[in-house]
Image (cartoon, rainbow, N blue to C red):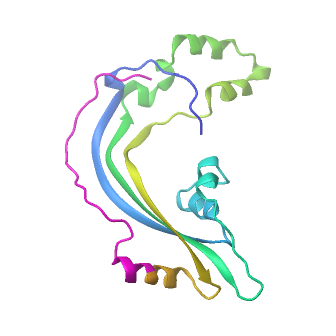
């Protein structure tokens, strides 16, 4: 996924905001045998390897000729959501009527033999909705024996930290607003 350019001319009537508050958590356990990039991509529903996952996923691998030692990593992710922004009206049902006029002219001018260039230039999809919130992540990396697994590592962390892998305070409030300064 990459940001390209402003594609649509829209107004505040074309976007709705609604409260959609939730929080959930995930524990991602990885070892030097199975990388965190593979686990993160699977847990987040992303296929393949992507820079942000691969960069965040690097971990040292330890080996010893006399004992089986592995590096383990436990990522605790808490996802919070407060609102959902959604397309509305004609922008939802007839998005082609909201195309930027210069892009519309570009699309109409592309010869049939080069139609694949449109997706390369503008992207292959646009978002119909987006969650507005964030993710808090805490990562624990440690050495473990070959016999350790996710259950034993989580138990060791809970013994030292209590039941919560991520600590702190926070609060949610419920409100509904409609944005008036929407830009593509």
Residue farthest toward the right in the current orientation of the protein: 113
For the residue pair 126 and 113, the one nearer the viewer reads as 126
For the residue pair 82 and 138, the one nearer the viewer reads as 138
How many numbered discs, if any? 0
Q: Does residue 8 appear to the left or right of 35 in the view shown?
A: left
What x and y, as percent, mark residue 41? 59, 58
Residue 18 counted in the magenta span: no
Against 20, residue 61 (above or below) is: below
What x and y, as percent, mark residue 96? 51, 22
Q: Does residue 111 appear to the left or right of 138 in the view shown?
A: right
Q: Does residue 116 appear to the left or right of 175 in the view shown?
A: right
Against 117, residue 157 (above or below) is: below
The residue located at (50%, 85%) in the rendering is: 152
Against 86, residue 181 (above or below) is: above
What x and y, as percent, mark residue 164? 35, 72
What x and y, as percent, mark residue 35? 65, 66
Residue 171 counted in the magenta span: yes
Quadrant of image for the N terminus: top right
Magenta extent: 157-184
Query: Could you tell me what secondary structure mostly forms the magenta stretch?
Result: loop
For the residue pair 70 and 100, the one nearer the viewer reads as 70
Please tell me in which quadrant of the rendered image residue 157 appears: bottom left
The residue located at (73%, 78%) in the rendering is: 63
Please tell me in which quadrant of the rendered image residue 158 appears: bottom left
Q: Does residue 67 appear to the left or right of 156 in the view shown?
A: right
Please tell me in which quadrant of the rendered image residue 117 appears: top right
For the residue pair 31 and 160, the one nearer the viewer reads as 160
The residue located at (65%, 85%) in the rendering is: 146
The residue located at (78%, 85%) in the rendering is: 65
Against 156, residue 128 (above or below) is: above
């Amino acid at each position: 996924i990459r940001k390209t350019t402003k594609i649509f001319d829209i107004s505040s009537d074309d976007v709705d905001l609604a409260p959609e508050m939730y929080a959930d958590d995930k524990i991602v356990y990885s070892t030097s045998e199975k990388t965190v990039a593979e686990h993160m991509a699977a847990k987040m529903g992303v296929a393949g390897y992507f820079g942000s996952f691969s960069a965040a996923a690097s971990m040292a691998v330890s080996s010893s000729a006399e004992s089986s030692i592995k590096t383990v990593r436990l990522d605790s992710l808490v996802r919070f959501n407060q609102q959902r922004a959604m397309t509305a009206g004609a922008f939802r049902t007839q998005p082609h009527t909201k195309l930027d006029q210069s892009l519309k002219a570009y699309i109409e001018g592309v010869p049939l033999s080069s139609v694949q260039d449109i997706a390369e230039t503008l992207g292959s999809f646009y978002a119909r909705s987006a969650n507005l919130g964030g993710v808090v992540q805490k990562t624990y990396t440690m050495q473990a024996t070959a016999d350790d697994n996710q259950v034993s590592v989580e138990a060791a962390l809970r013994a030292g930290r209590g039941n919560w892998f991520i600590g702190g305070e926070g609060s949610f409030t419920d409100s509904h607003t409609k944005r008036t300064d929407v830009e593509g």
